[in-house]
Image: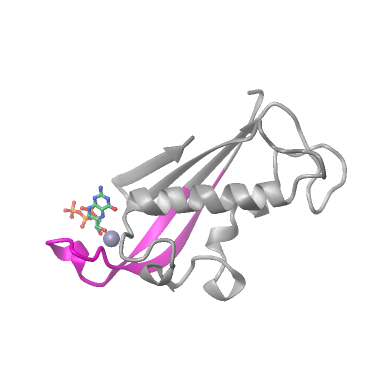
Amino acid sequence: MPWTLRTEFTFDSAHVIVGYDGPCGRLHGHTYKVRMELSTDRLRPSEHVKRSIMVADFKTLKWAKKDALQGGLDHTYLNDLAELGDDTTAEVLAAYLHRHTLQRVRADLPPGDDGADLKLRVTLWETADSSCEYWE
Ligand SMILES: Nc1nc2c(c(=O)[nH]1)N=C([C@H](O)[C@H](O)COP(=O)(O)OP(=O)(O)OP(=O)(O)O)CN2
Ligand SMILES: [Zn+2]
């Protein structure tokens, strides 16, 4: 794939891994760091520019850093997210970020473009030395 768009951001959230027999089974928080890498073999228009000059808008890839009241994950309690429930591991959250980011990228595509060539890789750091990657 000739282009890979890459962006990184952080968000702060609290969580509990329910049933975890240790400190992570108690309420605590992380400054999560996320790296989004979106690859494609052709450029496209976006919501803000109608010429085919982008893989996707960086803003679209960074939706999760927004405040919870604006649809993001910043200052949320992750266990409140119905799709995660009590399974708020880095693995489950990375897959959630992948699914929701691709949905947003696809929502920006022009009519008739199924985005089949778009490949997304999400890397999520829970702490400085512990991370999880998710891609399909
Ligand atoms: N496979 C996973 N293991 C653990 C996860 C996870 O999401 N997936 N999460 C946790 C806890 O949420 C914990 O907050 C983070 O774990 P850890 O990297 O162990 O964090 P610490 O900095 O507290 O680790 P040290 O022991 O101080 O190095 C646990 N496991
Ligand atoms: Zn944790």
User: Which quadrant would residue 62 be assigned to in this image?
Assistant: bottom right
Q: Position of residue 22 (x, y in %)?
A: 13, 62
Residue shown at 32% from the left, 67% from the top: 15
Residue shown at 59% from the left, 59% from the top: 63
What stretch of residues is rendered in magenta? Answer: 7-34
Q: Position of residue 24 (x, y in %)?
A: 21, 63
- The number of numbered discs placed on residues in the rendered structure image is 0
Q: Nearer the viewer, residue 62 or 128?
A: 62
Residue 46, compared with residue 67, is above or below; it is above
Q: Nearer the viewer, residue 36 or 114?
A: 114
Q: Position of residue 104 (x, y in %)?
A: 65, 53
Residue sitting farthest toward the top: 2
Q: Position of residue 124 (x, y in %)?
A: 41, 48
Q: Is residue 10 magenta?
A: yes
Q: Is residue 44 left or right of residue 20?
A: right
Residue 78, compared with residue 126, is above or below; it is below
Residue 121, compared with residue 64, is above or below; it is above
Q: Is residue 33 magenta?
A: yes
The scheme the figure's colours follow is one colour
Residue shown at 25% from the left, 72% from the top: 27
User: Which quadrant would residue 41 be assigned to in this image?
Assistant: top right
Residue sitting farthest toward the right: 50
Residue sitting farthest toward the bottom: 69
Q: Nearer the viewer, residue 98 or 128?
A: 98
Ligand 2 shown in quarter: bottom left
Q: Is residue 43 left or right of residue 66?
A: right
Quarter in which the N terminus is drawn:
top right
